[in-house]
Amino acid sequence: MKTALITGITGQDGSYLAKLLLQKDYRVIGTVRSYRHANTRNFDYLGIKGDVIIEELDLLDMANIILLLHKHKPDEIYNLAAQSSVSLSYDQPLGTFSFNTISVNNLLESIRLFSPITKIYQASSSEMYGLVEKMPIRIETPMHPVSPYGVSKMASHFMVTIYRESYNIFASNGILFNHESFLRSNNFFVKKIIKSAIAIKNKQQLSLKVGNINVKRDFGYAPMYVDAMWKILQQDKPNDFMICSGKSMVLRDIIEYVFDKMSLNKHLIIEDESLFRPNEIQDIYGDNTKAKEILNWEYNLSFFEVLDMLIEEEIRNDF
Ligand code: NAP
């Protein structure tokens, strides 16, 4: 039986990945920053509460990581813990950069010194690319991040590459584009739109305030993206992969689709410049050919199909 350690297990991806690995008969260790504040609602929802071994871990404290590696001897580590919000990273640039980089450095160094056979997956992000001149974005496309979050992910991405190339560690980056699910936190765009539309329909909210909705993003479905994470660590050699749908959508079209589905008047969508980000990527979509060919990762969903599933799931579980 293989042992996997997942950091950020309480998040959207951590929870779906835990479920997938349990189905594959892994022993799953999930780390939380504090037992007292660990929100295990996602485990209840996925029916995996009690199946995951939860450990408290301060990823900024390398000694803590080393002890955990000794205790559980994981075959694979999936490093998903991060301050993951681009918007919040403008309010907390130093906290975002420090945590998102030092945590990764500590994991890599602990593996190098004390557990070199452990494989590690790093959650890299399309936000590393930022302003690009040519699309679709490919792994080798030059990076020009425009948010503290993007810079933090870029720094970690290249540390992973260095540990792979210089120390022979099995360290791989999954460069994921936006992916959504029912378990997405309420402060992220798609979840916020769907929840607000339901609240407006139920007369609990008057209107929906949004920032710049003329930008385009490449959106996918989280439960299918975590499958790619697992596949990345099952390769013979460590490597980087881009996981995306390959198409971008205007945010306005997403909102209008959700409002149409719920028979809501579009006049209730209020664009508010105070919600605009200081610097915004206009359009972004990636090339998933390498992932499809080498990982045999399959992804053919249109984001309208994903929205249909998410709206239905949100209505069914609205609480
Ligand atoms: P998420 O739902 O925001 O989950 C983030 C996880 O990180 C949570 O478990 C959170 O724990 C933990 N975390 C945050 N700050 C921490 C800290 N200081 N110490 C310890 N743990 C901390 O994110 P996600 O959507 O699952 O994404 C997983 C990873 O993929 C992240 O690294 C994210 O940046 C990256 N990524 C996500 C996307 C996407 O579209 N979802 C795209 C590209 C890359 P708490 O429960 O304690 O807050």
Image (cartoon, helix red, strand yellow):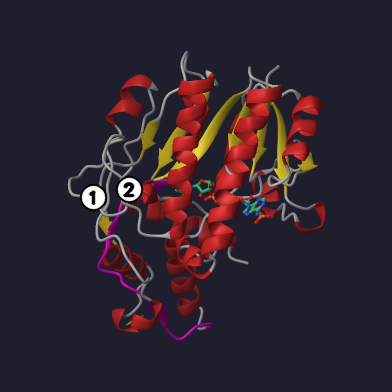
What range is drawn magenta here? 204-221
Q: Which residue is mark 1?
A: 132
Query: Residue 197: horizontal and vertical position, in percent?
Result: 44, 72
Q: How many marks?
A: 2
Q: Element type at marker 2?
A: loop
Amino acid type, callout 2: Tyr
Query: Residue at image x 48%, y 62%?
Result: 188
- Determine whether 232 is above or below 35 in the image: above
- Name the foreground residue: 181 vs 285: 285
Q: Residues within 10 Å of mark 1 (few under 14, many from 20)?
A: some
* Residue 260 part of the magenta-drawn span: no
Query: Residue 245: horizontal and vertical position, in percent?
Result: 32, 42
- Name the foreground residue: 199 vs 281: 281
Query: Residue 64: horizontal and vertical position, in percent?
Result: 78, 39
Q: Are marks 2 and 1 in contact (CB under 8 Å)?
A: yes
Q: Would you say residue 180 is visible in this rendering?
A: no
Query: Residue at image x 74%, y 28%?
Result: 69
Q: Which residue is mark 2?
A: 129
In-image side of 154 versus 270 (left or right): right
